[in-house]
Structure formats: C-alpha cells, structure tokens
Image (tube, rainbow, N blue to C red):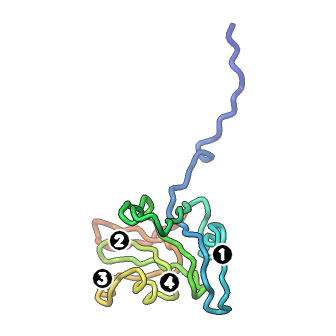
C-alpha cells in the first residue's frame, strides 16, 4: 500500500516574483556638499531612491580595460537606471507622454531629469503631465487616447 505524505505547498500568493523595474549601479561618488568620497552599495541606493529591493537587479561594474564591454548590449537597458548622484538628491519623476508612453527618470526636478535623460526642449510639447516618484496610478486608455486614473489595489 502506498502512503501519501502530507506536503505543504505554498499558496499562489507566496509564489509571486516581482519583475525587476530598476537596475542599481553601486559605486563611489564624491559629494558636492562635503567633498568626501562615499561608497554606496545596492541597498543604500534602493533606500535613497525609495524603491523596493525586490524589484531591483544589481549591475556588474565594467572594467575600464574591457573594451568589448562598450559594444555589448546591456541586458538591463529597459530598466530604470539608478546611480549615485553627486548632488545627493535622489528624486524620481514619472513622465506621462501624449502617445501613451511612460518614463521614470531620476533628477533634482523635472527639467533637470528630462535634460539628463536626453529629452530636448521640444519634447515638453509631447508631455501630457508628470508626477513625483515612480507613479503607477494611471493607465493608458487606447480607445480614448488619454491617461485614466486607476485605484491601486
């Protein structure tokens, strides 16, 4: 006779693995306020930016002598890149575009973040609105071609 043992399997909610949203780039930075060098590890960066470590991957440092590294594609290029900032300001801003795209970028304020992300002055005309932080309270409505506020769960 075959006896079945009791095996505890985790509930479905326990099996949820968060998809990475952020790529952390730990490293040293020279502070503009005190002129000293500070090393920020991955957990420091996640804390400073106010993001959940479970949604992060940590980038491997590229050595200066590794020429081929500059030609390789970055497997994390679609993630939000978070690096140490000299100014010590770790704000994130969410940009909602008129065509339904959404970008989360770091910066001191919205114009600074847009400039550092490579968006030129003319891109402001294509911007619908912006929000502080990594805002996920809006979804693009393809039928109405507009952003609709959704209530987070």
Residue 27 as seen in the image, left or right of residue 96: right
Residue 97 picture location, percent across and down: 34, 77
Residue annotated with mark 1: 39
Q: Nearer the viewer, mark 1 or mark 4?
A: 1
Q: Quadrant of the N terminus?
A: top right
Residue annotated with mark 2: 101
Which of these two is toward me, 95 or 129? Answer: 95
Q: Residue at x 52, y 81 (%)?
A: 132
The CA span between labels 2 and 4 is 19 Å
Dot 4: within a 10 Å radius of its alpha carbon, few (fewer than 14), some, or many (20 or more) residues?
some
Q: Residue at x 28, y 88 (%)?
A: 122
Disc with the residue nearer the chain's start (4 vs 3): 4
Which of these two is toward me, 47 or 44? Answer: 44
Label 4 element class: loop
The CA span between labels 1 and 2 is 34 Å
| Displayed quadrant of residue 114 | bottom left
The CA span between labels 1 and 4 is 20 Å
Disc with the residue nearer the chain's start (2 vs 4): 2
Q: Nearer the viewer, mark 2 or mark 4?
A: 4
Residue annotated with mark 4: 107
Q: Residue at x 39, y 72 (%)?
A: 102
Residue annotated with mark 3: 126
Q: Residue at x 53, y 72 (%)?
A: 82
Compared to 21, does 135 lie above or below? below
Disc with the residue nearer the chain's start (1 vs 2): 1
Q: Quadrant of the C terminus?
A: bottom right
The CA span between labels 4 and 3 is 19 Å
Which of these two is toward me, 52 or 66? Answer: 66
Dot 3: within a 10 Å radius of its alpha carbon, few (fewer than 14), some, or many (20 or more) residues?
few
């Amino acid at each position: 006779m075959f006896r079945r043992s009791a095996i505890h399997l985790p509930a479905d909610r326990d099996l949820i693995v968060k998809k990475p949203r952020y790529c952390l780039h730990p490293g040293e930075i020279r502070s503009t306020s005190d002129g000293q060098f500070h090393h920020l590890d991955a957990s420091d960066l996640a804390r400073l930016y106010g993001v959940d470590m479970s949604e992060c991957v940590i980038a491997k440092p590229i050595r200066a002598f590794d020429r081929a590294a500059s030609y390789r594609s970055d497997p994390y290029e679609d993630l939000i890149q978070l690096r140490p900032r000299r100014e010590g300001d770790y704000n994130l801003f969410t940009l909602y575009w008129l065509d339904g795209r959404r970008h989360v970028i770091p910066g001191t304020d919205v114009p600074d973040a847009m400039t550092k992300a490579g968006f030129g002055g003319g891109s402001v005309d294509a911007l619908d609105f912006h929000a502080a932080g990594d805002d996920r309270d809006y979804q693009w409505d393809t039928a109405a071609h507009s952003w609709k506020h959704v209530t987070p769960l």
